[in-house]
Image (spheres, rainbow, N blue to C red):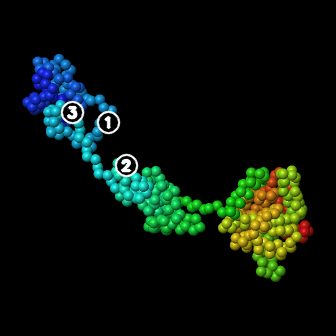
């Protein structure tokens, strides 16, 4: 490169001659000290024929500004300087052409790289035919390596987890990118490629992803679970809940259960502690009838019900259902055991009828079968009390002045505080505990 352009010889000559245009050895600098040459000859003043030229200067007057080789005036430009090593430097032929023509020496632009193959995308530049569009019409971001789909790192990670081949997906995102929804759709339609080694391919069953290494499982909200969610949400934000707890020694109840299992009157029927709890609740309702009521907001009345439709919460694959035993207050212990067995059996098999879940007045949820001590259950809609029956465990207990291992359980009663105050709720819960602690009380209260 040179600092300035070569000056012409002869006054009034519009272009330099061949003799004057040939640069001398002293006027050409090595390429290492090269600088940009002005874009036009008018940027550097050409000295007059009789004007002295200072040695070491090219076209610079003796009395004018001292323009050293390699530090000539730079053309104003808003472009960034090219990085080193990206573009080839000017050659001696370029310098010779600059001196002979008077044009500036510009850095030659590196030849453009040949365009990389573009993955065919339906609807992009080809009218949906799948042909490759012209390079000039394709954005730079769509030039990708062959066989590699456009997708963001999180989408690639999701596709890897689901075992989906990105190359097999038709992209719907901007500029032909594969989106998260594209991957999920491909996985849901079973269009996934074989899963990576060590991970099972995801199985799709009834719209639910089963197995595989996916990090999320999406389960459609079925009618039963949707109805349960709507019911408990309405109850939780309508009735002010209060929950009380009572720990009871149920050793005598467990002995009664063992005797009933051996009694021929109960042959062929399942006898469990839940049967005695259900009978104790019915007896406690008889002693505290106001507990078996409901709040009628439209009529502004408290409706006390003189019948007991005893609901039993049952967990099923379809969700939580609470079928109820109609007229439970009129059933004997054996009849109550039969009704309880049929109700729970139909619930587990998913055969519970809609009318069996209507008209409940008070309910029991048996969380003890899961090893849970107790809970704070939410009231079913239209009911004012629900009892949580916890796990029965052997624990150290003071009995007749001595610490002995006894069967112990904890009861939790949730009730609607609008119509049931603490006094009524406490007496009702205490009556249930009294029957469980001394089952012979049922003979007197019946």
> Residue, x 90% and y 67% (percent of image)?
445
Q: SS class of the residue under badge 2?
A: helix
- Disc number placed over residue 137 in the picture, else none: 2
The spot of residue 201 in percent (x, y) is: 49, 67
> Residue, x 12% and y 30% (percent of image)?
21
Q: Of the residues under marks 2 and 3, which one precedes in the sequence? A: 3
- Disc number placed over residue 80 in the picture, else none: 1
Q: CA distance from mark 1 to mark 2?
A: 27 Å
Q: Of the residues under marks 1 and 3, which one precedes in the sequence? A: 1
Q: CA distance from mark 1 to mark 3?
A: 18 Å
Front residue (pair 193, 325): 193
Q: SS class of the residue under badge 3?
A: loop
Q: CA distance from mark 2 to mark 3?
A: 34 Å
Q: Which residue is mark 3?
A: 104
The spot of residue 130 in percent (x, y) is: 40, 59
Q: SS class of the residue under badge 1?
A: loop
The spot of residue 367 in percent (x, y) is: 72, 64
Say whether residue 120 is left or right of residue 360: left
Q: Is residue 6 visible?
A: yes
Nearer the camera: disc 2 or disc 3? 2
Say whether residue 121 is left or right of residue 58: right
Q: Quadrant of the C terminus?
A: bottom right
State how many labels appear.
Answer: 3
Q: Of the residues under marks 1 and 2, which one precedes in the sequence? A: 1
Say whether residue 61 is left or right of residue 428: left
């Amino acid at each position: 490169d040179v600092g300035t352009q070569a000056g012409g010889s002869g006054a009034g000559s519009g272009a330099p001659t061949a003799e004057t245009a040939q640069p001398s050895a002293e006027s050409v600098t090595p390429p290492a000290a090269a600088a940009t040459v002005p874009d036009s000859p008018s940027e550097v003043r050409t000295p007059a024929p009789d004007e002295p030229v200072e040695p070491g200067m090219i076209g610079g007057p003796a009395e004018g500004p001292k323009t050293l080789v390699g530090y000539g005036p730079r053309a104003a430009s808003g472009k960034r300087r090219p990085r080193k090593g990206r573009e080839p430097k000017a050659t001696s032929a370029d310098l010779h052409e600059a001196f002979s023509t008077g044009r500036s020496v510009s850095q030659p632009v590196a030849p453009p790289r040949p365009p990389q193959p573009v993955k065919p995308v339906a609807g992009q530049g080809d009218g949906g035919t799948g042909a490759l569009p012209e390079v000039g019409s394709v954005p730079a971001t769509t030039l990708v390596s062959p066989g590699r789909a456009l997708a963001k790192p999180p989408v690639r990670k999701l596709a890897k987890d689901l075992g989906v081949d990105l190359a097999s997906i038709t992209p719907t995102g901007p500029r032909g990118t594969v989106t998260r929804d594209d991957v999920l759709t491909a996985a849901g339609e079973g269009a996934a490629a074989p899963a990576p080694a060590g991970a099972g391919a995801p199985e799709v069953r009834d719209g639910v992803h089963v197995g595989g290494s996916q990090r999320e499982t999406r389960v459609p909200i079925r009618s039963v679970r949707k109805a349960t969610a709507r019911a408990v949400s309405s109850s939780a934000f309508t009735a002010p809940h209060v929950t009380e707890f009572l720990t009871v020694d149920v050793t005598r109840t467990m002995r009664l259960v063992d005797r009933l299992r051996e009694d021929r009157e109960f042959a062929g029927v399942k006898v469990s502690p839940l049967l005695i709890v259900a009978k104790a609740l019915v007896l406690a309702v008889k002693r505290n009838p106001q507990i078996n009521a409901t709040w009628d907001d439209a009529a502004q009345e408290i409706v006390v019900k003189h019948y007991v439709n005893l609901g039993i919460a049952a967990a099923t694959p379809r969700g939580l259902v609470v079928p109820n035993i109609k007229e439970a207050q009129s059933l004997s212990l054996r009849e109550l055991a039969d009704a309880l067995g049929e109700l729970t059996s139909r619930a587990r098999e998913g055969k519970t009828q809609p009318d069996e879940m209507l008209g409940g007045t008070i309910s029991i949820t048996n969380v003890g079968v899961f090893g849970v001590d107790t809970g704070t259950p939410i009231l079913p809609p239209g009911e004012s009390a629900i009892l949580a029956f916890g796990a029965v465990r052997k624990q150290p207990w003071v009995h007749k002045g001595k610490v002995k291992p006894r069967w112990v359980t904890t009861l939790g009663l949730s009730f609607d505080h609008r119509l049931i105050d603490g006094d009524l709720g406490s007496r009702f819960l205490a009556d249930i505990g009294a029957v469980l602690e001394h089952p012979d009380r049922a003979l007197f209260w019946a």
